[in-house]
């Protein structure tokens, strides 16, 4: 279907945005479903965020994704937050319902979906990191009934997050980084949500604490084979690389805009093509 006067617009706002794999994934789904939607990448600098959000509303965008560095700072410019996004304090998806912008967070549910697809045992989950991704992933696993342990370089952030999750009636506790190894020994699942591994061949998780009883997920997808993933593979862990979480958060976002179950295999094919893999 070609773009015409009735095309419903969607996209992503980020800074930088050129690296984004979201346009091919979302557009592949729109083509597969035969719906008249289009998805574009939009470079929005932090100082232009409010103007951009007001502009997207004025232009009647159906919705848009929100990526780094806007996931938290966008909150005051939205009309509503769904309960999960409110708990996470971060938004990665906005839906425009007749001029009212509602913020959602599909990053956490996307991670849970990636873990379930890998048939991982989610009874005892360790989350490393308590930033935006750490919040979303910790909440999502806690909500699915996992016993969640959060470790972060800045212990207070992990502690605050665990307390907030606990107040919602879910099971979460915080540990200091020097207790990470002990927590991992008892865990069935480990989610790496820090930004370490994106720019350097480093991991925040010591290799020797990884064990074959563990499924691990890295939220980082560039590179796909992070130091953490390589270490986990060499220690016999079941590994989930970051693009699986990227795929599933995208599928969940797409459905919020179209109201139609997405064609996940079509999105997956487009994603791997964009990543240079077939
Ligand atoms: P995102 O939205 O991608 O999660 P973020 O909110 O900036 O990004 O969070 C980054 C996470 O990576 C935090 O958990 C951060 O730890 P701090 O809370 O102590 O800052 C973690 N992180 C970043 N660099 C790190 C490093 N060199 N060692 C350990 N943790 C690091």
Image (tube, helix red, strand yellow):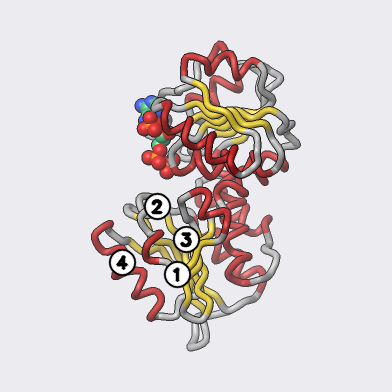
Q: Position of residue 115 (x, y in %)?
A: 67, 39
Residue occupying the far top of the picture: 208
What numbered label is drawn on residue 72? 2
Q: Quadrant of ligand 1?
A: top left
The residue identified by callout 4 is 50
Residue under numbered circle 1: 79
**Camera-nearest residue between 138 and 222:** 138
Is the residue marked 2 within 8 Å of ligand 1, measured from its CB? yes
- Asked whether mark 3 and ligand 1 are closer than 8 Å, the reply comes as no
Which of disc 1 and disc 3 is earlier in sequence?
3
Q: Which numbered dot is residue 65?
A: 3
Mark positioned earlier in the residue sequence (3 or 2): 3
Report if residue 176 is visible in the image.
yes
Q: Give left or right: position of 77 versus 253.
A: left
Please name which of the two marks, 4 or 1, marks the residue nearer to the observer.
1
Q: Depth check: give the residue in front, 47 or 237.
A: 47
Cα separation, mark 3 vs mark 1, equals: 16 Å
Q: How far, Cα to Cα, is label 3 from label 2?
A: 13 Å
Q: Residues within 10 Å of mark 2 (few under 14, many from 20)?
A: some
The residue lying toward the viewer, choosing from 264 and 111, is: 111
Mark positioned earlier in the residue sequence (2 or 1): 2
Question: How far separated are the C-alphas under marks 4 and 3?
Answer: 15 Å
Q: Earlier in the sequence, mark 4 or mark 1?
A: 4
Which quadrant of the structure image shows residue 232? top right
For the residues carrying marks 3 and 2, which lies nearer the camera in this image? 2
Vertical side of 242 occupied by 124: above or below: above
Q: Is residue 216 left or right of residue 98?
A: right
């Amino acid at each position: 279907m070609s773009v015409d006067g009735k095309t419903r617009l969607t996209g992503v706002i980020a800074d930088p945005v050129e690296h984004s794999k979201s346009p091919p994934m979302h557009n592949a789904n729109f083509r597969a479903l035969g719906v008249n939607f289009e998805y574009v990448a939009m470079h929005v600098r932090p100082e232009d965020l409010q103007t951009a959000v007001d502009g997207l509303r004025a232009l009647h965008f159906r919705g848009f994704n929100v990526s780094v560095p806007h996931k938290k700072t966008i909150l005051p410019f939205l009309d509503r937050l769904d309960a999960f996004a409110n708990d996470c304090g971060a938004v990665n998806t906005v839906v425009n319902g007749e001029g009212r912008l509602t913020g959602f967070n599909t990053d956490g549910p996307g991670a849970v979906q990636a873990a379930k697809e890998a048939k991982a045992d989610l009874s005892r989950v360790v989350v490393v990191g308590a930033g935006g991704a750490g919040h979303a992933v910790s909440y999502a696993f806690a909500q699915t009934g996992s016993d969640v342990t959060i470790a972060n370089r800045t212990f207070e952030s992990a502690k605050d997050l665990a307390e907030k999750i606990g107040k919602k009636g879910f099971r979460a506790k915080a540990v200091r980084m020097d207790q990470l190894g002990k927590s991992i020994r008892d865990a069935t699942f480990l989610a790496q949500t820090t930004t370490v591994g994106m720019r350097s061949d480093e991991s925040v998780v010591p290799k020797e604490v990884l064990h074959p009883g563990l499924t691990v997920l890295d939220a980082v997808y560039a590179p796909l084979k992070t130091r953490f993933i390589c270490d986990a593979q060499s220690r016999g862990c079941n590994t989930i690389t970051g693009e699986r979480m990227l795929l599933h958060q995208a599928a969940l976002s797409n459905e919020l805009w179209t109201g139609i179950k997405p064609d996940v295999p079509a999105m997956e094919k487009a994603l791997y093509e964009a990543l240079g893999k077939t």
